[in-house]
Amino acid sequence: MTRMLVRLIKATRSNDGQSLVLAALAMLVLTVGVLTTVNIGHSVHERIRLQNNADAGAYSIATTEARLFNYVAFTNRAIVSNYVMMTALASIISYLALMETQFAAVYIMAMNAGCALILTIKGAPAGKKIQSMANSLIEPIRKMFRQLVDQLKGPVGKLIEALQKNAAAHGMQQKLNAVVTAGQVGMGIFRNIIQKQDPKLKLTGFPQIATTVFNMTELLGAVDFRSKSRREHKQELVELINASRKSENNFITKRNSIVQPSLFGGLSALAKFLSFTFPTDGQTKVLANQNPRNTRNTGNPDSYMATGDSMVANDRVPLFHVAFGNTQDAVNVQYSQTAPKICRFQSYRSIICFRYGRWRCESDNAFKWPGMVDYTALKPKGDSSFRQPEVFVALNKDPKDLEQVFTLKFKYDGGAAGQADIDFNTGRKGMLGTGLLKGLNAWTRGQVYYHRPGAWQEPPNMFNPHWRGRLAPIGQLLQTPPSSGGGSVMPVIRNFLSDNLITH
């Protein structure tokens, strides 16, 4: 008994075993450090993964919208091509009517020359022979062109109507594709992409709904489907039509020969003779002004700032003024909704044996034309974005879906020294401890932008298919505008977003 007490007293007075306590404390600190490092590494990995998913979603939306805009650009070009074809058909009718008028003028001049010889008595046989030749040679040709115009104006009008409907169909396809694209954005086109990368990520929270609504509003707010009701959009389309009319032989913009060999190859010899002797001048344009004489070529056929809703073809020749005694154009063909008409040679009039022509305008529903169709254009916007739509994607991942390695929580009570909590659950308290958006958050900005290679100063438009999608820095939007009067509020918001949402 005495020996046991002696040993117990010696054990209590010995220094052996003190390092064990220190080692235990060191192991605790080391364990906490290891666990913290592992969890931080896992959280950083999950944050990068979440940010990559948000980037992929924003980029997919931006490229989808850019694909829509490029489709609109191609179909707008198709609409322009349809109208150029309409002007070509109108040019044919005007040109055939010009041929009738021209041969009528030649007939009048021949008959008047014969009449002058007949009145001299001695030249009566020669005068009658000239008139006979005019009646047998020139007048049948004039009647042939008259019949061609009367027989072709109906079918040509039907072709123009078909081209008009085709152009309108392109406009309707643009609207349908825009609605489908907006629906894809609204339904979450990025969902499949994101969920393939992270199946546990939920896309039904407030950030996702808010950004989806914003993206749909931004897309539909950037385009204008009722373009023909806006003067600037209609003018833009008409100017492109008029600028696209030129071809190798300039038949639409400047008909400068009596007979076009490309249309009447068998009359090429006559074409060369008449074109040299009686030069002509004519063109076809799309205009808003109902006065067809505004289409007259003055050396610059693209100088008129037209706004649409009438398509006018006119042709004039100097010989016409001699035979008809006026300064009117030889032919005016006006395709219009309100005033469809054709102005051309009508009939002959006589004074003794001298002839002169009668020129008259008459309404004709064969030239009825509904005007411009709706096409998709960019809405004007007075800021630096030039109506290039923005795209935002916000993602949130709940702490329970983060698959953390350790989800422990320690509480240290040091008495008078204070207390401390060690929580390995990432984002449990939400942003800034508010309890909102618990877990990890990522926010990405995309942009649908226009860039034509080699022409970076060209403003965005819906006629050139040079739209692309890209990611854009969010921090650029958080700069305080000098005129905003934000004061010290914006820096607080900027820091808040930068600390909690922005990773790049």
Image: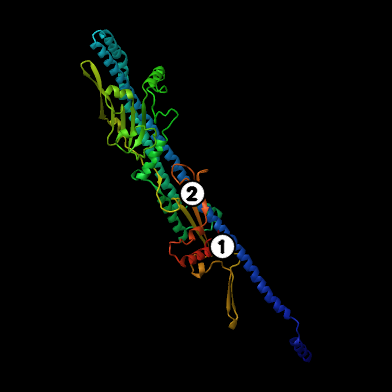
Looking at the rendered structure, which numbered label has been put on residue 402?
1
**Circle 2 sits on which residue?**
449
Rendered view: 391 above or below 489: above
- For residue 337, what is the image quadrant? top left
Identify the amino acid type marked 2: Tyr
Residue placed most toward the observer, 263 or 427: 263
Rendered view: 434 above or below 317: below
| Mark 1 or 2, closer to the camera | 2
Residue at (45, 66) in percent of width and height: 487
State left or right for residue 422 relative to residue 484. right
Q: Is tag 1's residue or tag 2's residue first in the polypeptide sequence?
A: 1
The x and y percentages for residue 85 are: 39, 32
The x and y percentages for residue 168 are: 37, 39
- For residue 75, what is the image quadrant? top left
Q: Residues within 10 Å of mark 1 (few under 14, many from 20)?
A: some
Residue placed most toward the observer, 58 or 187: 58
Quarter of the image where the C terminus is located? bottom right
Rendered view: 76 above or below 97: below
Question: Which residue is most to the left?
Answer: 352
Q: CA distance from mark 1 to mark 2?
A: 35 Å
Rendered view: 465 above or below 212: above
Question: Which residue is most to the bottom?
Answer: 2
Q: For numbered disc 2, what is the local secondary structure?
A: strand
Quarter of the image where the N terminus is located? bottom right
State left or right for residue 297 relative to residue 39. left
The x and y percentages for residue 218 are: 43, 53
The x and y percentages for residue 464 are: 46, 42
